[in-house]
Image (tube, grey):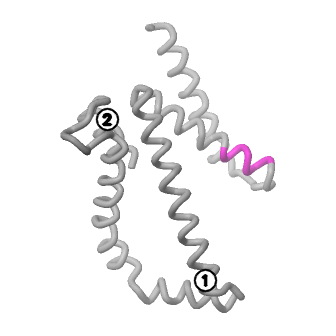
Amino acid sequence: LRHSAILSKKVLDGKSLGENLTPANMFAVLSILGFCAILPVSLALEGPAKASAAWSAALAAGYTTPYLLKLLACSGFLYYIYNEVAFLALAEVAPVTHAVTNTVKRVVIILASILVFKTTITPLGAAGSAITVAGALLYALAKNKYK
C-alpha cells in the first residue's frame, strides 16, 4: 500500500483526476485493484485446503461461524480505515516524512508490546529498533537544518 499511496500522491498532487477520482476514491480503487491482484496469488500459494483447515481448527477451538465472520469483517474494516487514515495523512505531508513517521510508529508498537505484554526481544531486534529510532532522529535533524 505504501508504494501505491506515494505513487498516487505524486500523480494526483492534491487535485482530482476527472470528476470523481479524488484522492480518497483513488485509495478505494487501488485497494480493490490490489485485492484482485493478490487473490489469485493467495489462492495459489495457500490454497483452499489451508483456509479450510484453519477454519476447522477455529471451530474446534470453540469459536462459532458467526463469531468468526464478525471478527473477519471487523478486522477488514479496521484495516481499511487504518489505511484510509494513512492515505489521508500522506496527502498532508511529504512522502519521506510519512515513511519516517510510519517507521517510528512501528517502533512505538514494538516497545509498547514489550512493556505491556512482556514480549521478549532478541538482541538483533533491539539493534534494529535502535537503528530505526536513530535514523528517524537523524532525518528529523537534517530536515530541520535544511528548512
Is 120 on the left or on the right of 138, as rendered? right
| Disc on the earlier residue, 2 or 1 | 2
Give residue 133's position: percent from left, percent from top. 61, 31
Give residue 65's position: percent from left, percent from top. 60, 86
Q: Quadrant of the C terminus?
A: top left
Residue 66 — which label? Answer: 1
Q: Which residue is mark 2?
A: 9
Pick the front one: 124 or 25:
25
Give residue 115's position: percent from left, percent from top. 80, 47
Direction front: furthest residue: 19
* Residue in view at x 29 percent, y 74 percent: 40
Q: Nearer the viewer, mark 2 or mark 1?
A: 1
* Residue in view at x 62 percent, y 39 percent: 129
Find numbered disc 2 in the image and state the secondary structure of the residue it sits on: helix
Q: Amino acid at mark 1?
A: Pro
Q: Is the residue 98 above or below the residue 76 in the image?
A: above
Pick the front one: 86 or 125:
86
Magenta range: 109-115
Find numbered disc 1 in the image and state the secondary structure of the residue it sits on: helix
Q: Is the residue 72 above or below the residue 100 in the image?
A: below
Q: Is the residue 123 above or below the residue 12 in the image?
A: below
Is 114 a magenta residue?
yes
Is 104 a magenta residue?
no
